[in-house]
Image (cartoon, coloured by chain):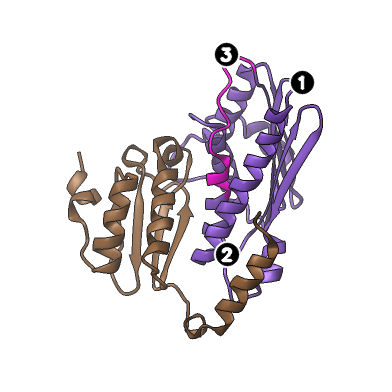
Chain colours: A purple, B brown
Amino acid sequence: MRELSLNVMDVVQNSISADAKLIAIEVREDIPGDRLSITVRDDGKGMSEEQVLQVTDPFYTTRTTRSVGLGVPLFKMEAEMTGGSFEIESKTGAGTCLTAVFRASSVDMVPLGDINAVILLLVTCNPELDFLFTRTRFGDEEHRFSLDTRELKEILGADVPLNSPEVVQWVTEFLKENTDQLLGKENEK
Amino acid sequence: MKSLEELKAIRDKARSSVEMRENTDAETRVLVGMATCGIAAGARPVLTSLVEEVAKRNLKNVMVTQTGCIGICQYEPVVEVVMAGKEKVTYVNMTAEKAVRVVNDHLVNGNVVTEYTIGANKQ
């Protein structure tokens, strides 16, 4: 994929297919440590020990339309190419947690890309699900912001779904402002 | 700075608006293929474009959503339009610009954009 944010979009689709109700996406940049890590955690139906071993095989998939499943293997390859790591923890009935770590300065690093567009699309196109997006940047200090759709829903109530135009606008601006601030803070130093 | 107060204002405005109390069951569903093949082929800008255009045109009975592998990976990005009581229309090789036309011609005016459909593009 051209951007890691597209890999995130891809693996979150797996969480959705696994009937997850809450999906937590965390992006953490560790500048002095030269690491970018992405964690996707869901409360879906999870995988058996055997499936966890198979899921990184490109020829393993649960879909019936094709016989390859490239999403997870691609993400793993991209992480390992940079000298990073990739881990999946899962238990049947208890959800799945996937962590991809990248060495940011590697020549093979894939850019993070437009992660806000991905979060916005996930939130607005799956209004019945909940997402917790956290973005952290550790430079001289740690700065972080998060978006929790459960909080938004509590305020908006049942009458206003997350895909209403004004809410979509609000989420777009919220993500942009907070990201600008997160990245801007580093440049000030 | 964006604040949760603004969300409260959105909620209050919605509650006072008669439109929101109407039946909001989507009569039309627009499904965008979001499997690995679709994402790699460029489905994200298509989805963004659809969501924006539907919001811009204020189409109340339309639900834009993501779907998994449809099985025609070489034609991705794929958009399926399902309207109550009508046959499903499958658009292939979609782009953000084509998506805008589909919203305006098909969703608003009811005219299927035949040249974008799978029937017109089969190899």
- Sort mark 3 into few (<14), some (14-19) or many (20+) by Cα contacts within 10 Å: few
Instruction: Please state which amino acid type lies under the numbered disc 1.
Output: Pro
Viewer-proximal residue among B73 and A162: A162
Crowd class of label 2 (few under 14; some 14 to 19; many from 20; radius 10 Å): many
Depth check: give the residue in front, A86 or A159: A159
Q: Is residue A57 visible?
A: no
Query: Which amino acid type corresponds to the residue marked 2 in the rendered image?
Result: Leu
Q: CA distance from mark 3 to mark 1?
A: 17 Å
CA gap, disc 2 and disc 3: 39 Å
State which tag comes first along the sequence, 1 or 2: 1
Indicate which disc, 2 or 3, sits on the residue closer to the N terminus.
3
Pointers 3 and 1 within a single chain: yes
Q: Name the residue: 56% across, 16% down.
A: A108
Residue at the top extreme of this rendering: A107
Is any part of residue B16 visible from this angle? yes
On screen, B7 above or below B78?
A: below
The x and y percentages for residue A3 are 52, 31
Closer to the observer: label 1 or label 2? Answer: 1
Camera-nearest label, 3 or 1: 1
Dot 1 lies on which element?
A: loop
Q: Position of residue B26 (x, y in %)?
A: 44, 72
Chain of the residue that carries numbered disc 2 in the rendered image:
A
Which residue has dot 3 on it?
Answer: A107
Tell me the residue that label 1 is attached to.
Answer: A32
Residue located at (54% from left, 29% from top): A58
Label 3: chain? A
User: Residue under circle 2?
Assistant: A162
